[in-house]
Image (cartoon, grey):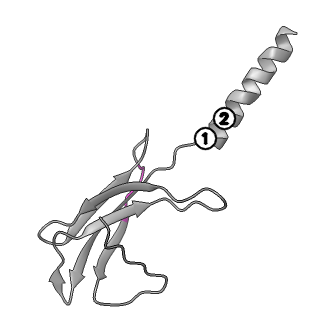
């Protein structure tokens, strides 16, 4: 009986660790509009959930005077790698682009 309880406890610990892993991410880049730095623009970092779980806001911030931003979103661990988004031209229209004017 003790072996069975230990086995069930071990399986539950493994299953919880695999299912409930924390998602963390980071991104940095520069926003420009018509070739000029886009200062004070709100940038949001979302996770991409599939299925019935809705996407979660991981972090939000604003660009500095040079249009630069860096965001890290996590709950209990830091990202191992920061994604470099490069320079993004805001005057263009991109596929699947969405704009959020509610801050």
**Residue 100 sits above or below residue 96 on the image:** above
Query: How crowded is the residue under tag 2: few (<14 C-alpha within 10 Å), some, or many (20+)?
Result: few
In the image, residue 53 lies in the stretch drawn in magenta: no
Q: Secondary structure at mark 2?
A: helix
Q: Nearer the viewer, residue 18 or 97?
A: 97
Residue 18, position in %: x, y?
65, 40
23 shown above or below 8? below
Of residues 86 and 98, the one drawn nearer to the viewer in this rendering:
98
Q: Position of residue 95 (x, y in %)?
A: 47, 86
**In the depicted structure, whether residue 30 falls above or below residue 79:** below
Residue 78: assigned label: none
Left or right of residue 25, residue 84 in this image:
left
Assign a secondary structure to mark 1: loop
Residue under the image location 36 percent in, 73 percent down? 100
Q: Which residue is mark 1?
A: 20
Tell me residue 92's x, y (percent): 33, 90
- Give the extent of the magenta segment: 79-83
Give the overall secondary structure of the magenta segment. Answer: loop
**Residue 50 to residue 39: above or below:** above
Q: Are marks 1 and 2 in contact (CB under 8 Å)?
A: yes
Q: Is residue 79 left or right of residue 23?
A: left
Q: Which mark is residue 16?
A: 2
The C terminus sits in image quarter: bottom left
Q: CA distance from mark 1 to mark 2?
A: 6 Å
Q: Is residue 28 visible?
A: no
Quick check: 76 left or right of 12?
Answer: left
């Amino acid at each position: 009986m003790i072996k069975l309880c230990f086995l069930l406890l071990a399986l539950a610990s493994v299953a919880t660790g695999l299912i409930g892993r924390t998602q963390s991410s980071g991104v940095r880049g520069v926003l420009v509009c018509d070739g000029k730095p886009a200062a004070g623009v709100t940038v949001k970092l979302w996770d991409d959930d599939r299925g019935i779980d809705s996407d979660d806001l991981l972090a939000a911030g604003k660009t500095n005077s040079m249009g630069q931003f860096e965001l890290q979103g996590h709950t209990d661990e830091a990202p191992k790698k920061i994604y470099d988004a490069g320079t993004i031209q805001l005057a263009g229209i991109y596929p699947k682009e969405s704009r959020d004017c509610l801050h």
